[in-house]
Image (cartoon, helix red, strand yellow):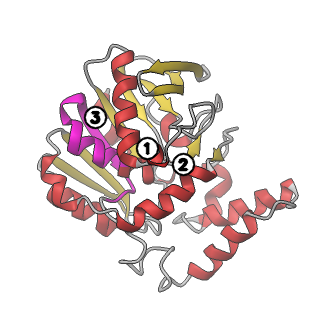
Amino acid sequence: MSKWTREMIETSRGNFEVFVKGKGEPICITHHYSEFNETGDYFADTFTDNNRVFLVNLKGAGNSDKGSNAHELSMVDAVLDLEEIRKVNGLSSWTFAGHSTGGMIGVIYGIHFSTSLKSLILVGSSAREYTSSSSKCIYNEGHPKFKRMQELIELLKLPNLSEDERKRLSKERTQLSLFKPENYERYFSKNIVKKMSANRMNFFIREQLIFDVTRQLSAVKTKTVILCGRHDVQCPVDFSIEMSELIPDASLHIFEQSNHYPFLEEELEYKRIINSIVS
């Protein structure tokens, strides 16, 4: 199995660390605060059989430039940066695929740069703030597992955790977002290791409080595929349904046996749909 190849891409907006894998039509993938490396990413891996995937560390993540102004960590700036990366690679257009907060960046990409996109794939995402408005969200105080999720988040911040304890807590946290938590080991069996950019996470927490682009979704003029688990506790399915109703050329597929990770929980069905779009 081929590995991800690390590239440093110089643009007029800064230097970016990008990992590339696969051959075929180009697909760009990123996430608001994940720090990617040569081990790859579970979501990105689902596209590498048939496509050339560009997995981008945004400013402040990995070895990409840190940025000198706070706004450079915003979702709008992320889209402007991705556009420059596309141009430097000599691509007239590409597909953007985003999971969770990556999908939120994708929505903004579609609103402002549809002509740069062959298609847009949004998985388990939203076009507006989703935590305070829905008790189906695990980050909402009305959710039955809100308290435990908050406890796990705080415990994982402790600096003196042993590696085994950190893994145990991280596993429990992820299991809260699985339809069948007992399948955790099977889903997450690859040697993929990711970190999180604390600065980007902190900026996102503030930005998402006022995030709402639903009234601009009619501006998305590229083919858009929206996928979500019926039981998603992070970005509840209602927000995917909403996007599918407001984006003109959108299709929606709901995975009945999935939570936040349909590309792992119902991998065969997910890949069937993806391959019909981008291969």
Image height check: is 10 above or below 75? Answer: above
Quarter of the image for the N terminus: give it. top right
Quadrant of the snapshot with the C terminus: top left
Q: Amino acid at mark 1?
A: Leu
Q: Is residue 258 above or below residue 194?
A: below
Amino acid type, mark 2:
Tyr
The answer to which image quadrant residue 41 occupies is: top right
Between 122 and 114, the residue placed more toward the observer is 114
> What residue appears at the point 55 percent right and 41 percent down from the top-left corner?
42
- What is the residue that sits farthest to the front in this orientation? 68
Element carrying mark 2: loop
- Residue designated by label 1: 268
Crowding near the residue tagged with mark 3, few <14, some 14–19, many ≥20 C-alpha atoms within 10 Å:
few
Residue 109 inside the magenta-drawn segment: yes
Q: Earlier in the sequence, mark 1 or mark 2?
A: 2
Residue that mark 2 sits on: 33
Disc 1 from disc 2: Cα separation? 28 Å
Q: In the image shown, does 10 or 196 lie closer to the viewer?
A: 10
Magenta-drawn segment: 105-126
Residue 249: image location, x then y, percent: 13, 46
**Percent coordinates x, y for residue 238 in the rendering:** 30, 69
- Dot 2: few (<14), some (14–19), or many (≥20) neighbours within 10 Å? many
Question: Can the viewer see residue 48 in this picture?
Answer: no
Residue 170 seen in this snapshot: yes
Q: Which residue is mark 3?
A: 276
Circle 1 SS class: helix
Depth check: 119 or 10 in front? 10
